[in-house]
Structure formats: C-alpha cells, structure tokens
Image (spheres, rainbow, N blue to C red):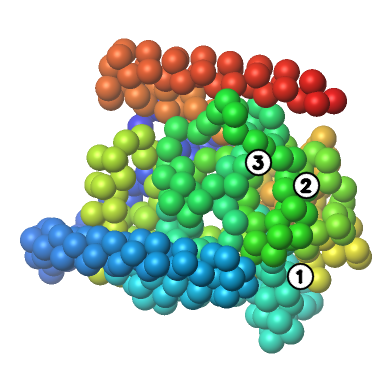
Amino acid sequence: MEKFSRWRDQGTGIQPFLPPVPANADHSPIEKTLTVILMIVKPITGVVKLALVSVVVLAFVLFQMAGLALSPLGFLYRLYSRLIMAIFARFILGLLGFFWIKHEVVTIRRGRSSSTSKNQISAKKSTSSGNLIVCNWSSYIDVLYLAFRYNPVFTQIYLQTLTVREVTFWEALRLSGSYPELSPPEGVETWPLLDFVKAMHSKGAGPVVVFPEGTTTNNRAILKFVPIFKSCSVPETSIDITVMALKYDYYKFAPTFTVGLNNSYRFGHLFRTCAQFYNSLTVKSLASEESPSNPNFSAMDGLSSTPSGAAIGVVEPVEEDALGSVIMNLMGRLTRFRKLGLTVQDKVDFLDYFILRNNGIGSMKKISTQKATSTSALSSSRSSRSKRQ
C-alpha cells in the first residue's frame, strides 16, 4: 500500500509491518471452483476449530489453577507446569493447523553437515534452565511454539531503558502484535538482560526467551535489534545463547500477526488461522558450537556473508551493540531474511499512522496519553535508580 510507503526499507524495498499480500495470478476454472468451495467451507471450519480452541484454553487454565497446590513443592511444580504447558500448547497448535513443525539444528559454516545427532544433543544442552534463546518475532504462534517446546521465561524489552522484565505466557501472547511499550510502566522492576538471565539461572526457572526486534514483523525480514546486548562481550561466555529463527510458509493467508491493537484484530486473525486446513512453520536453531557464547567463536563468523540491505558477502562494521549485531547477522543467515534499518520505533510511528487512518483523531489522543505516561514512568525509574546509586 502506497500510503504506508514511508515504512518501506530503502535498502531492500521490504515493508515489514503490513500483512503479506499474495501475488495476483490467473487461475484455471478448476482452481476458481475450488476457491468458491473453500469460501463456503472455511468459515464453518473456523467456527468449529475456534470453539475447540476455547474449550482447550479453558481446560488449560483449570489445570494451571489446580497445579498451584503443588507450588510449595518446587521441582515437582515446575515439572507439572512443563508437562501441562507442553500438552495443551501442542494441542492448540494442532487445532490451528500446525500438525507438523519441523525443527532443525543447523550449521552455517561451509563444509559441515547440518541436523546431526551431535547438534541435537548440543541444542538440548543449550536450552537448559537460565540459558538464553534469541528469536525473531512474527506472531503469537511463536509464543505458543516456544511454550510447547521449552516452557521458558518470556521477557518484554524496553527501548528507552535497554532493560527487560519477565512476563507470563498470557502476557507474551497479548504483546504479540500490540502497540510496543518503549519504556516500563511506573513501579515495574526491570533488569539488564545479562543480570536477568543469570538470576533466572540461579532460580532454575527455565530458559529465557528474548525477542530483540521488540515487536512483531510479517516474517519477511529482520528489524534492527534493540541494543539490549550492549553490556555483553563477543563471545559472551558467561551464559549459553541459542540463536533461533522461525519461518512461515503460506499460500493465501500468512499466520504472521503485525497489527493486534485490540481484541477485534486478535479475534479476526485467530479465526482466519483456525479456518486454514493446514499451516506451515519451520524452526531453525544454530548449532551450539557456532553460538556466540562458545569460547571459540569469532565476531567475524557472525559478520561475514550475511544477507542484508547491503551487498551479500560484504563484511559490515561492528556497531556499538557488538553482540546484537553478530546475532542479527547469524539469524539472517539462518532464515535468508534481509536485515533492515527499521526499528521498533518505526513500528510505533507506523501504528500511530495506522490508527489515525483507521480510527480517527480520538485514538491518537489515547496514544499521546500512553506516550506521556511512558515518559513519566521513565523519569521516575531513572530517578529511583539514581537514588539507589
């Protein structure tokens, strides 16, 4: 859409914030007939599967509440929570059409094989309690998949403070596609990323997931990371880092979710996802021996031959956030996505314009109030930190 062309990356021509639109193509009479049939059948499928999803979610909540009785037992409670999360999250993914999710542990170095049993073992070690999973972010489906596979600690990152806070599984679902919060609300404790990961490790709370783009995209490119890795070194040997990438293949409807400003957007997208007979998701994890937490890792391994807005094969300069730049390049090589110069701040500006065009001036006043509140919270958090210092 030309009215949103100002948020098209100049180097690549990619617009990462709008839902992907399938290319127009001439169809045969058989394909046109099939399309008409699907237009009739899909709404029925969507209603049935959405009702089943609602029942499963309700059952999941009830099992979670029942499990609170085990909370004093520590390890047993975590084991119960992990089992319940794995069962119900996978069931919901199946209802949404993700019957088979391919997970590969791959190497990006030339001359080495991928998806070996050794790599699979390394991957399990690198996602143990308190270790860091760095992942791109395109949909609430990402959250469901990560919850099913790892039952991790989800985080929310803040651009203005370069800190993170822990969020629940339900909050992580809500944040997918939502208006990004650039600074933490007043009274909410946040941590530098490295300190937070180490704290979770000491508590045995499970692996930590961070979405360094800070917001969802349409899964066609990678936004410039929020520089939350500024205090980290390359390699960062004090923690274990798993670089992961999720990629959706689709024909008509993309499961990516870039605009989820209210419940009507969320419900509409969930209904269309349920109406799909089949959805496809491929997950790739970088082999642990090539992780930037490996003591033998070199920054040049992450910066060479990287698909981006610049020419492929050009070694790009290391930025102030050296580790973030390296991980962004590694993630780009896993997915073959282009790296963009657009950031979470651009997503905020995009949504401001989107709201203005779709809902009028009244909604912009609400956004202005949210920004003022965020600014006030930022000032309060800074003053409190200075007092502690």
Q: Earlier in the sequence, mark 2 or mark 3?
A: 3
> Left or right: 381 with respect to 304?
left
Counting other residues with Cα less than 10 Å from the Cα at mark 3, is it few (<14), some (14-19), or many (20 or more)? many
Q: Quadrant of residue 9?
A: top right
Residue situated in front as seen by the camera: 230 or 224: 230
Residue indicated by mark 2: 195
Residue type, numbered disc 3 = Val
Rendered position, 207 above or below 104:
above
Q: For the point 58% across and 42% down, which residue is it?
A: 156
Residue situated in front as seen by the camera: 58 or 151: 58
Whether tag 3 and tag 1 are in contact, CB under 8 A, the answer is: no
Q: In front of the other: label 3 or label 1?
A: 3
Q: Which mark is residue 105?
A: none
Rendered position, 142 above or below 21:
below
Whether tag 2 and tag 3 are in contact, CB under 8 A, the answer is: no
Rendered position, 220 above or below 35:
above
**Cα gap from disc 3 to disc 1, whole angstroms:** 24 Å
Q: Quadrant of residue 153?
A: bottom right
Q: Earlier in the sequence, mark 3 or mark 1?
A: 3
Residue indicated by mark 3: 164
> Left or right: 195 with respect to 296?
left
Residue indicated by mark 1: 288
Residue situated in front as seen by the camera: 164 or 321: 164
Q: Position of residue 187 (x, y in %)?
A: 59, 29
Q: Quadrant of residue 72?
A: bottom right
Q: Position of residue 387 (x, y in %)?
A: 79, 21
Residue situated in front as seen by the camera: 78 or 110: 78
Q: Position of residue 283 (x, y in %)?
A: 54, 67
Q: For the point 40% across and 62% down, which residue is it?
A: 65
Q: Secondary structure at mark 1?
A: helix
Q: Secondary structure at mark 2?
A: helix
Residue type, numbered disc 1 = Ser
